[in-house]
Image (cartoon, coloured by chain):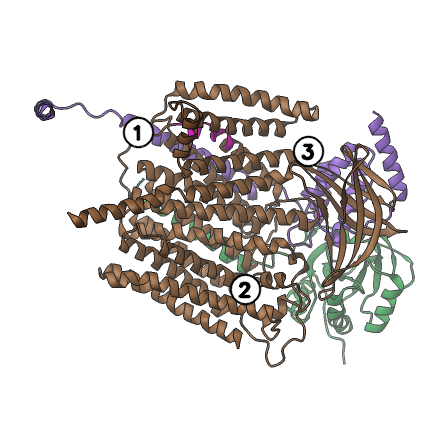
Chain colours: A purple, B brown, C green
Amino acid sequence: MKRVILRALLGAVLLALSTASFAAIDTYAFETAAEEARYKALIDELRCPKCLNTNLSGSDSPISADLRRTVATMVQAGKGDEEIREYLLARYGDFILYRPRVMPATYVLWFGPALLFLLALAFMARLVLRQRRAEAPAPLSPEEQAALARLSQAVGENSKA
Amino acid sequence: MIPELGHFALILALMLAVLLAVVPMAGVVRRDLTLQHSAGALSAGLFVFLLLSYACLTQAFLQDDFSVAYVANNSNALLPWYYKVSAVWGAHEGSFLLWTLIMGGWTLAVALRSEALPTAMLARVLSVMGALTVGFILFLLMTSNPFERVLPVAAVEGADLNPQLQDFGLIVHPPMLYTGYVGFSVAFAFAIAALLSGRLDAAWARWSRPWTNLAWAFLSVGIALGSWWAYYELGWGGWWFWDAVENASFMPWLVGTALIHSLAVTEKRGVFKSWTVLLAIAAFSLSLLGAFIVRSGVLTSVHAFAVDPERGMFILVFLLLVVGSALALYALRAPVMRAEARYEGLSREVMLLANNIVLVVSTAAVLLGTLYPLVYESLTGGGKISVGPPYFNAVFVPLMVLLLLMMAPAPLARWKRTGAAQLMSNLSKVALASVALGLALPLVITGALELWPVLSVMLGTWITLALLVDALERVRNKQGLSAKLRGLKNLGAGYGGMVLAHLGVAVTALGIALTTTYSTERDVRLAPGESVTLGPRTYLFEGVAPLEGPNYVADQGTVRVFQNGQPIAVLHPEKRRYLARQMVMTEADIDPGFFRDLYVALGEPLGEGAWALRVHDKPFVRWVWFGGVLMMFGGLMAAFDRRYRRLKLRDQAALAGALAS
Amino acid sequence: MSRTSLFLPLGLFLLMAFMLWRGFALNDPHELPSALLNQPLPDFQKTRLADGAPVARQDLLGTPFLLNVWATWCPTCKAEHAELNRIAARYAVPLVGVNYKDDGPAARAWLARYGDPYRLSVVDEDGSLGIELGVYGAPETFIVDGDGIIRYKRVGAVDRRVWEEEIRPVLQNLGLPLEEPPA
């Protein structure tokens, strides 16, 4: 409890002192640790529209700073994660989401690996079962049995010698 | 003069590579032993000229020869000499020359260390490697010549090496990585040789194994070094982003791991032959695909070299020719007959098959995710999508958990058939201990139970204890400690390598789970004299002072770290401005530790001497790379098992005996 | 394992190679298609660059126009500016500027120096209008129709080729005559 209060106080102080953020290290203050965690998770999952494959938290381009500010403001205003994602989706398109939406055009992406895994398991099962069925050799015919008896006798005689 | 010499050496290397690709193979077709034997000398000559060419480029850098375009674009007179040497591979042309040199190196190594191979087989293998080298050198000469001059007016000063690359990481990561990447060409060449000769047997697997283990070892450490470098260089505390270029190195590693296990099965039991050949082709194909991804610009990446569609097209055509013909050869010549040896449902064969399935499905998932933006754009007529860590983690992690689970029973399982009862009795004790430790350790150390730490400690213990139980089982019949130790030694380097490598995997998995869960960070505004608390430590900011480096000026901050009132570290994060390119870089400072890293980075000055600072506390992050180092030692150890060398002596003795009688 | 099934890897590889080959033909992986195509221009309450008077979305409706995001710190904007001047002068195409994350006095001086093709420029100092528009760098140019619906977006400079091949046809479809004024 004391930690929460101290953190809130620190947050309030920082909020009072914080100036505009210029670089990837912003000093936003949030009311609760949960909010801060949500903010961090969101900026990890959102892509910088301008950079060569970096998320908002790792980018120091101006547009990323603007977008981080937007996300921080929305989190502080109590907006939910899904709402924030949809807000940015409406303006920047699917590109800005590092977690692709599950939609017909991404069914192969999301379900392909699982499907492949199941197919492979089925293949392995079939392989093993086929082995087991072929395990027992066919019984010998009468002629083969006689030949086997003769050979065994011959081997037995040889080994005694 | 020297650049021209280097260029000329490259052309000579090309001619030798063409000869190497053609002559020994012709010797095989015509059953001409002399032609077959020429492969050795040709390999040596090829390597010598590639080395000469590379040395000339290095010399051009060391001499600040800015009349060479590549030197002018990537170096600077003020650059320290060790970065000049590394700058040779700092951009596309030079790094590909290094790649080709390493190819020559592997070719020579195979030529020198393959006395056990029948001449015809060696000739085929070296010819295939020669053919690949032809492609690489053609690529250099036709699209990426590092020796091109900027004439008539040479640059007065170089544009400097990208400041992000002026780092120890550049010195070690690319050479190790490329050695691994290119090393899979040996297994590839062996596979092609086997398909061509129709000789696909246990001997072929035995010859391939040490080379594959070696390449895998280098690739493992290369990837670990890259991850470590990105971690301390990029400034946001991350060490893996599932970026296209990272995936490009990871996919050959995954398939290479599957290949190592599949080769073991084929050597010991003569089964899975076609599958092993396919994996050998796939591993190197993924290396080539990696080269394509990094150098073509088709996929966006922070790590990619400068974009050039013309080069990309060349690599794609090369990829099509090499992989297409390899897979066509496979389809036409791989054996369809079922192997004789049988195995039961509970056997090492089946466990390793399961291992392969998990690894190959993981590779497919990573490949799919990496290329999906292209697929999506085609499907939707221009739509853009991003596939990033949330996807890859969601798909990869469950598969890895499965793999880690299987890593305990698999070494204990016997070939062909394992008694379920015995396996269970060994493993049930291990399982109990793992569950207990998995619950106890996190609880005792952190006071809470979180999913991933608990799971990873369980799995890490599971794997380690199972290895211990297995080792004890194998020396059960020896009496006394010294006999047991000798017994362990007699199990061979192959066994020891397996143990080390598996431990490495467990350590990496543990490191990943623990650091992901327990890392904390704070972004704060601090004025000199202010401090921030993170976990059990306090970070006191003492301000920033100017600093001059060899080719940069910087603001250097001082942060003192205290724990329990005692000072434990002083950190100096910097904000550097590199003079030549006028680029501003953040240099984080890290207090490394085996159990935790303390990481501080400077943001922007916020006025009145105050700065934005980021402080990270990252427990166990070093384990991620330490595991990679263990894997490397494991792979090296297994590659140098005397079993592979002793056979050479045995073959020689047999030959001598046969000749004498 | 039948012989035909051994051709599966080759088939999959060729499919992948085809995807990669397509990758060259596709657009720069960096050019994002606009998420706002066929969506209404977002509403805003901003001020005009010239005199600080308030301007909102409805002030811009009525005829199709080009919305150009520009700034003094953007070198490509300077490069495309001549083309914008030309378009504004020769064709009856209204241009509206969005002065993106810029400094007012510097922007006015810039226009005075390089020409002002815009009916008006909207001041977007903090970039919030840019975010509403899905802007991630300058210059960017939109075509907005008479009802305020966004019909086209171009990321990067507008040059003669872009005008002739991409922008002009869309404007003509929207009903702008685009006659050249009599000499």
Vertical placement of residue B619 versus C15, above or below: above
Query: Who is closer to the viewer here, B603 or C122?
Result: B603
Query: Gap between marks 2 and 3, in whole Å?
Result: 41 Å
User: Which three-letter amino acid code belongs to the residue tagged 2?
Assistant: Gly
Residue A141 lies, in percent from the top left, at 12, 24
Expressed as whole percent of the image width and height from the top left, the position of residue B535 reads 76, 33
Q: Which residue is mark 2?
A: B94
- Residue that label 1 marks: A131
Q: Residue at x 46, y 74 (%)?
A: B8
CA gap, disc 1 and disc 2: 53 Å
Question: Which residue shows up at 44% across the image and 52% down it?
Answer: B183
Q: Nearer the viewer, mark 1 or mark 2?
A: 2
Q: Are marks 1 and 3 on the same chain?
A: no
Q: Which mark is residue B518?
A: 3
Tag 3 or tag 2, which sits nearer the N-term? 2
Q: Chain of mark 1?
A: A
